[in-house]
Amino acid sequence: MAEEKAELGWADLMKMVAEVGSENVPGSKAWKAEGSETKRVNEQFMRALRDNNGKVPGELADMPALIITTTGSKTGEKRAVPLGYQLVDGRLLVIASMAGAERNPPWFNNLVKTSEVLVEKDGESFSANAVVTQGDDRNYLFQKICASEPTFAAYEARTDRVIPVVELRRK
């Protein structure tokens, strides 16, 4: 009998958000353990995106998501992670919120060191340069993103850091 694939849902994402805000953050010993909810959801999410031309079936079908592969800043190894994305004025953007944690997510640190990334979106793969937006441009983009996704404003309110907005520029 074939193994049944469990469908991802909002409950899975909310568990992951709670975990990211705890001590079990990406890169920690607990994260690397088999029991990481975030690791499990990320792997399932990437499989669903790859199997369905960039869409996650079920209640997350309308969520715009992609996979970004960065080069590890310490290891040099390729690291893939699924991310939600936003389109603002035709620009492809990802937000390094890590649910409002006090530090940036590891994928962000990776692309700061090596800006060339691989993007998998809508069943297509392409190389891109990851550009961290700055100043008025970042503020404008973040304001537009928060207007459509208020969760990001809540994330920024719970941290002292400025949440980075990254543009993925297709090569």
Image: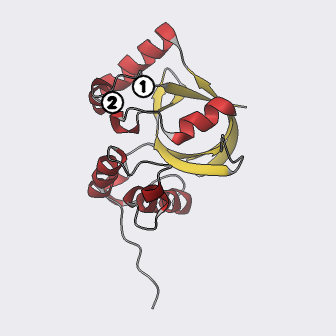
Identify the residue at image location x=35%, y=48%.
Answer: 23
Asked if 89 appears above or below 8 in the picture, the reply is above
Identified at 47% across, 33% down, the residue is: 104
| Left or right of 138 in this view: 63 | left
User: Marks 1 and 2: CB-CB under 8 Å?
Assistant: yes
Say which label, 1 or 2, has the lower sequence index.
2
Q: Which residue extends farthest bottom? A: 1
* Residue position for label 2: 152
The image position of residue 157, as x and y in percent, is 27, 24
Q: Residue at x 53, y 24 (%)?
A: 90
**Outermost residue to the top:** 136
Disc nearest the viewer among 1 and 2: 1
The front one of 90 and 43 is 43
**Image quarter in which the N terminus is found:** bottom left
The x, y position of residue 3, in whole percent, is 44, 82
Q: Amino acid at mark 1?
A: Ile
On-image quarter of the C terminus: top right
Is 96 situated above or below 60? above
Please provide percent x and percent y for residue 120: 60, 47
* Label placed on residue 119: none
Residue 78 relative to residue 95: left or right: right
In this view of the protein, which residue sits in the foreground, 73 or 92? 73
Q: Which residue is mark 1?
A: 163
Q: Secondary structure at mark 2?
A: helix
Which amino acid, by three-letter code, is at mark 2? Answer: Phe
* Label 1: element kind: loop
